[in-house]
Amino acid sequence: MPLHDWADDRGWNSLHLVWQNELLELIQQRLPPGYRAYIGSVPALTIDAPNGRPDLNVRTWEGEPGGTAAQPTGDPTAPDTETVAVFDLDPQTALHIDLHGQLVAAIEIVSPRNKDRPSARERYTGRSLAYVRQGVHLMLIDVLPRPVGFSFADVIAANLAFEQPPCPVPFAVSYRVGESVPGGTLLAVWRRPLTPGQPLAAIPLPLTVEHAITIDLETTYREAARRVYLK
């Protein structure tokens, strides 16, 4: 199944979920003993943006300027203030792999809401960097060409201060986090450009610095597209 041109992202949400499940099934069949693959939630505010500022603001109910002050009730567990924080809980999930309860690798498939505004791109970049900086191997798949000229792979490379050729969308990129060495941390990167109308490439997903499993993007994408009736 050739890659669709996702400049029109209608139907993406359905494909995203099914493709994620296809990847999960593939990986479960290939994991060595002791590893576990599962689809887990990714709370948006637990892995923060690079500048440390969560993307939220606060509003109060009409007629209650400055917030809703809690009235003394004699209950020491009552909040001092109750208001409404205006932010969206991120419903996104990612494919996680752990070994004896420790997260060792993750696959993230980029969605439109991850890049539809600057704050979303900043937050998602921070989340991706957090995996790598915590020693978690990461595969990032982005087939959504909007906004034109923006690439998470390029932003991550710039933030981690390593040189790489431009990696425009669509792409799959995989990061293997190695041991600390003088001057930094060893990082191996696999880049696979993807082209609308062409089959998708295979790419390694590292589990350790010595071992990786190959992820067949074409087969999993084709089956996901078949199941959601994409032509």
Image (cartoon, helix red, strand yellow):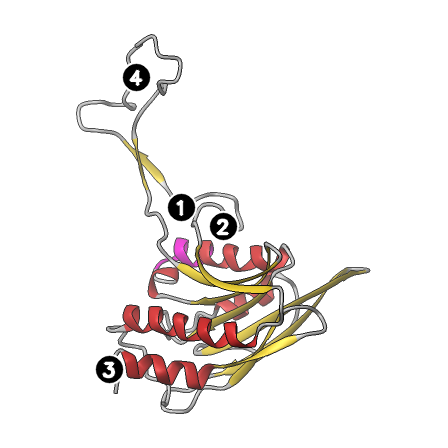
Say whether disc 1 or disc 3 marks the residue closer to the N-terminus.
1
Label disc, if present, on residue 229 of the rendered structure: 3
| Image-quadrant location for residue 161 | bottom right
Residue most extreme to the right:
182
> From the viewer's perspective, is residue 14 above or below residue 127?
below
Is residue 170 part of the magenta span, yes or no?
no
Residue at image location 35% in from the left, 47% down from the top: 89
- Labels 1, 3: front one: 3
Alpha carbons under labels 3 and 4: distance apart: 53 Å
Residue 226 left/right relative to 164: left
**Residue stretch in magenta:** 117-122
Residue wearing tag 4:
70
Q: Which residue is mark 1?
A: 55
Labels 2, 4: front one:
4
Q: Quadrant of residue 226?
A: bottom left
* Real-space Cα separation, disc 3 to disc 2, in angstroms: 36 Å
- According to the picture, the residue beneath numbered tag 2 turns out to be 49
